[in-house]
Amino acid sequence: MVATAIRTIFLHTAGEDLRTRLNVVVGVLGRQFLQVKNMMLEAASG
């Protein structure tokens, strides 16, 4: 489930679409997988 959700982010090529999808995935995963959420946000900011 986690890997599939993360893969959907990379289907988007436009910057704003990608950022929007990232935020959706982080929001969904963050409810159950706090560490994954934190890692994704850290990777996106750096």
Image: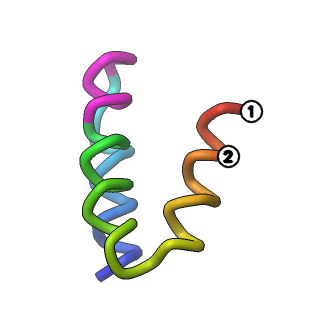
Q: Which residue is mark 2?
A: 42
Residue 31, above or below 11: below
Residue range in magenta is: 14-20
Residue 16 sits inside the magenta stretch: yes
Contact between labelled residues 1 and 2, with CB atoms less than 8 Å apart: yes
Residue 19 locus on image (x, y percent) = 37, 29
For this rendering, which residue is in front, 15 or 36?
Answer: 36
Q: Secondary structure at mark 2?
A: helix
Residue 38 locus on image (x, y percent) = 59, 59
Q: Which residue is mark 1?
A: 46
Quarter in which the C terminus is drawn: top right
Dominant secondary structure, magenta: helix
Quarter in which the N terminus is drawn: bottom left
For this rendering, which residue is in front, 18 or 35?
Answer: 35
Q: Secondary structure at mark 1?
A: loop
Q: Identify the residue at image location x=32%, y=72%.
A: 31
Question: Of the residues shown, which amino acid type is indicated by label 1?
Answer: Gly
